[in-house]
Amino acid sequence: MWDTRQHFEDMVRPHHLDIRGIIYVVDSSDPGRLRIATRALDRLLRDLPDASVLLVFAAKQDRPGAMSVADIQHQLQLQQLVDKECGVFACSAKTGEGIDEGIAWLVRQLRQQDGTGCCSADQAIPCFLQQVPS
């Protein structure tokens, strides 16, 4: 699913053969769009019932007035919508803050469920994400 800012387009149904985890990114600097994001997340979770882990990135934390992780959890109604492992991480694509931690959490959850150690954090982090110096 992708958001073009004008509308959502559902890209999931034809492609969800063996999806075990979902990464959902929310613009935490735009509270006005959270109702739309909540409906889209609900639809996504119904379309992918076999996905056992949900990672939510509360993005744009570098912006003034960005909503907190607790606010995002509440606004997305995660307690009511989600019946799977769920982690919410504050992040900023601009600074890189929180991205590695979120991906590492997702990989740990999938490894624990699988028990085989089939995937590694190095494989899970896309190559276009650059490490940001501390």
Image: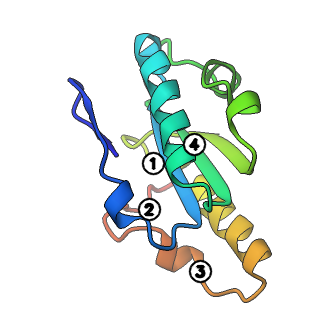
Badge 1 density bin: few <14, some 14–19, many ≥20, Cα 10 Å: some
Q: Is residue 38 above or below residue 117?
A: above
Which amino acid lies under the numbered mark 1 shown in the image of this protein? Gly
Disc sitting over residue 120 in the figure? 3
The answer to which of marks 4 and 2 sits earlier in the sequence is 4
The answer to which of marks 4 and 1 sits earlier in the sequence is 4
Which amino acid lies under the numbered mark 4 shown in the image of this protein? Val
Q: Give whichever of 93, 2 is nearer the camera.
A: 2
Q: Nearer the viewer, mark 1 or mark 3?
A: 3
Q: Is residue 124 above or below residue 91?
A: below
**Where is residue 127 drawn, in percent x and y?**
35, 71
Q: CA distance from mark 4 to mark 3?
A: 19 Å
Answer whether residue 29 is visible to the viewer in this image.
no
Instruction: Describe residue 83's horizontal placement relative to residue 39 as left or right.
Output: right
Badge 2 density bin: few <14, some 14–19, many ≥20, Cα 10 Å: few
The answer to which of marks 4 and 3 sits earlier in the sequence is 4
Disc 4 secondary structure class: strand
Q: CA distance from mark 4 to mark 1?
A: 15 Å
Answer whether residue 50 is visible to the viewer in this image.
yes
Tell me, what colour scheme is on the image? rainbow
Which amino acid lies under the numbered mark 3 shown in the image of this protein? Ser
Dot 4 and dot 1 residues touching (CB under 8 Å): no
The answer to which of marks 2 and 1 sits earlier in the sequence is 1
Q: Which residue is mark 2?
A: 131
Q: Give whichever of 54, 126 is nearer the camera.
A: 54
Disc sitting over residue 96 in the figure? 1
Badge 4 density bin: few <14, some 14–19, many ≥20, Cα 10 Å: many
Which amino acid lies under the numbered mark 2 shown in the image of this protein? Gln
Q: Which residue is mark 4?
A: 56
Disc 3 secondary structure class: loop
Q: CA distance from mark 3 to mark 2?
A: 16 Å
